[in-house]
Amino acid sequence: MSRVYNFSAGPAVLPEEVLEEAARDMLDYKGCGMSVMEMSHRSKMFDDIIKTAEADIRELMRIPDNYKVLFLQGGASQQFAAVPMNLMKNKKAGYIVTGQWAKKAYQEAKLYGEAVELASSADQTFSYIPDCSDLPITDDMDYVYICENNTIYGTKYKKLPNTKGKDLVADVSSCFLSEPVNVSDYAVIYGGVQKNVGPAGMVIDIIREDLITDEVLPGTPTMLKWKTQADNDSLYNTPPCYTIYICGLVFKWLKKNGGLVEMQRKNVEKAAILYDFLDNSKLFKGTVRPEDRSLMNVPFITGDEELDKKFVAESKAAGLENLKGHRTVGGMRASIYNAMPKAGVEKLVSFMEDFEKNNLK
């Protein structure tokens, strides 16, 4: 078997151990004679899968009892509408725009009420996190919204915004389960799982129970009401069963490997290898203000578009996949999620060192 080092931003690398277990289970899950892909979501066997997955993520994140965990279809982007539909009681909310996904969520919220841009880093191509210590938050705002880790631009909030008592809603898609968090600091945490947790096709919502009510905006579809999903334990309709199963295996893998404290330690170590090289390189440079750098997504450039293209082509030939940067930033981007081994980052840096020697003018 020849595996590449996959630096894709999502769908992204999964732990080999998890893939091997899924392969063993593919035709016959635990002696039931069928695959998880084939079993009824109402069966006892799947009930065990989803309940165990929920128990494990609760343990990993230390989720308080007054928060619901929902496994939902539609990905994180569907929550751009679901959040205002479920929370905009006063039809007003504050958004901090730090990248493409926060911007899309902000634009979507405008369809349902008054979305106010509290701060933005668009002036410098989203290469930093704005000062959020004293935002123009008003009493009539229902919530404050952030995208905590910006996949495309490689920035991360190191300190949560001062919301002045308002509920904080955070899209954590690309930093999900990469470090310990205090769930009580948030009203809602949600993340598409295809970056750091599982295969594409699902979002996990962690919502404080008092926010799950019948008081939603008129016209909210039944499927987008959090109460519909919570009352039915994520089984109102057929859920993304196989994705839930794989996420469950990833939760077990995380627990076995030291939980979120150990993941954070490893992620800090991996990112330091790459950032240290970038900070001392004569050819490559990072694009993010150092204090706002993400541990998960590392964009970098040479400053020469043709050289960037050459790097992407040669790195692919060397077994380093999906290093091309997002079209809005250009250059390269290495996504180094939980499942990316340290050896993968070391191989990337070694390749970059050789490339620099051969291409530095």
Image (cartoon, rainbow, N blue to C red):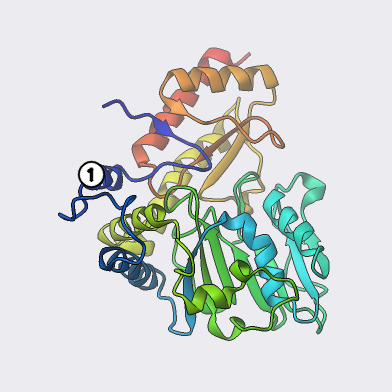
**Viewer-side residue, 157 vs 204:** 204
In the image, residue 231 above or below residue 348:
below
In the image, residue 211 above or below residue 80:
below
Q: Quadrant of residue 146?
A: bottom right
Q: Residues within 10 Å of mark 1 (few under 14, many from 20)?
A: some
Q: Position of residue 275 (x, y in %)?
A: 52, 41
In the image, residue 265 above or below residue 350:
below
Side of 123 relative to 50 (left or right): right
Q: Position of residue 175 (x, y in %)?
A: 51, 56
Q: Position of residue 347 (x, y in %)?
A: 39, 30
Q: Position of residue 268 (x, y in %)?
A: 44, 52
In terms of secondary structure, where does tag 1 sit? loop
Side of 113 relative to 65 (left or right): right
**Viewer-side residue, 226 vs 177:** 226
Residue type beneath disc 1: Leu
**Viewer-side residue, 152 vs 359:** 152
Query: Which residue does the image show at 78% across and 78% down from the upper left?
Result: 141
Query: Which residue does the image show at 47% across and 22% down from the upper left?
Result: 316
Q: Quadrant of residue 63?
A: bottom left
Q: Visible in this render: residue 56?
A: yes
Quadrant that contains the N terminus: top left
Query: Which residue does the image show at 82% across and 70% down from the upper left?
Result: 113
In the image, residue 33 above or below residue 309:
below
- Residue annotated with mark 1: 27
